[in-house]
């Protein structure tokens, strides 16, 4: 696989954000990945979307080729939904994207929503696959002891080689459910040489745990009614995360919503069956807005 980096964007707090040209032609579509992944893991999805769009992806802070998060004045890592939304806007501004469409998966989807709320009119349309938005007007306090955070802290950090990592992930859920091309790209670009030998995860498990702990510390639900662009909310039929009932509550607040449930996939749908998800995205972006 080749390096597709096209630039490095500097966020407002000085964090370097890696940006990747994922191919395609047509109007731009900005791709925002899920926690723990990176943009190039979505290359199979980007190839299917590229029949109608130029796909630009970025690695969120603490992921992939981007910088680890800086510390704030209190000595805490700058990792929060609002930081991720600011990174989205930094990418849009630095690349001069004029009202791109946006595709987001999980925390990437909520980052796009928060960015559009912070600066209305940034996006022409959004497709949000299981956005991390609770149907609550008030933010949820950080929970460092939730199951996802505990699991992240226990994650294996190093492997003797990328091939060893691939074989490890391919043998057990949930990563064994990924399209082999997506899993190979996740391993290829999600691990870096370890000074002690072998390879190490680019997304540090402690950073990932903090992201899960702070995942709902935002006001996205309260301000959903302020979104004027069309928004498609999608989930997998077999999801164990953000399902149809939650999406219905989110859609009720949107001016131009659409809800889609994709068959035969779970929360990792865009990485499991990228062609099917791409067909849903292209169909949604090609339809007129609805009330």
Image (cartoon, rainbow, N blue to C red):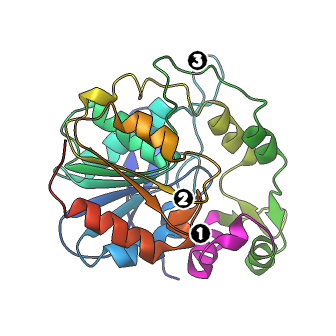
Select label 3 or label 1 by which is in front: 1
Q: Residue at x 56, y 69 (%)?
A: 264
- Identify the element where label 1 is drawn: helix
Using the image, tell me which numbered label, if any, was put on residue 65.
2
Q: Residue at x 54, y 47 (%)?
A: 243
Q: Is residue 251 above or below residue 64?
A: above
Identify the magenta region: 172-190
- Identify the element where label 2 is drawn: loop
Quadrant in the picture for the C terminus = top left
Residue 149 position within the rendered picture, expressed as x and y whole percent measured from the top left = 74, 39
* 33 falls in the magenta region: no
Q: Earlier in the sequence, mark 3 or mark 1?
A: 3
Q: Circle 2: is it few (<14), some (14-19), or many (20+) Cα within 10 Å? A: many
Residue 245 position within the rendered picture, expressed as x and y whole percent measured from the top left = 50, 41
Q: Residue at x 32, y 41 (%)?
A: 89
* 176 falls in the magenta region: yes
Q: Nearer the viewer, residue 123 or 290?
A: 290
* 48 to the left or right of 244: left
- Identify the element where label 3 is drawn: loop
Residue 86 visible, this angle: no
């Amino acid at each position: 696989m080749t390096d597709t980096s096209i630039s490095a964007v500097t966020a407002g707090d000085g964090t370097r954000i890696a940006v990747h040209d994922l191919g395609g032609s047509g109007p731009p579509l900005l791709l925002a990945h899920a926690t723990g992944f990176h943009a190039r893991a979505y290359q199979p999805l980007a190839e299917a979307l590229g029949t109608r769009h130029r796909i630009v992806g970025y690695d969120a802070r603490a992921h992939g080729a981007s910088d680890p998060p800086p510390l704030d004045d209190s000595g805490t890592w700058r990792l929060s939904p609002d930081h991720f939304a600011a990174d989205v806007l930094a990418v849009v501004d630095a690349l001069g994207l004029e009202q791109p469409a946006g595709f987001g998966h999980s925390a990437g989807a909520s980052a796009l929503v928060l960015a559009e709320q912070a600066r209305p009119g940034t996006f022409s349309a959004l497709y949000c696959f299981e956005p991390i938005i609770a149907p609550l007007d008030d933010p949820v306090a950080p929970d460092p002891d939730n199951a996802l955070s505990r699991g992240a802290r226990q994650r294996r950090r190093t492997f003797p080689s990328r091939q060893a990592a691939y074989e490890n992930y391919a043998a057990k859920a949930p990563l064994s459910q990924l399209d082999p091309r997506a899993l190979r790209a996740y391993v290829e670009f999600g691990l870096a040489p370890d000074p002690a030998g072998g390879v190490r995860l680019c997304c540090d498990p402690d950073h990932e745990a903090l992201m899960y702990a702070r995942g709902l510390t935002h006001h996205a639900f309260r301000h959903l009614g302020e979104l004027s662009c069309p928004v498609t909310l999608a989930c997998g039929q077999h999801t164990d995360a953000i399902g149809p009932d939650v999406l219905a509550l989110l859609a009720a607040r949107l001016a131009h919503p659409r809800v889609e449930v994709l068959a035969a996939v779970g929360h990792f749908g865009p990485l499991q069956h990228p062609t099917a998800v791409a067909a849903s995205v292209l169909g949604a972006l090609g339809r007129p807005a609805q009330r």
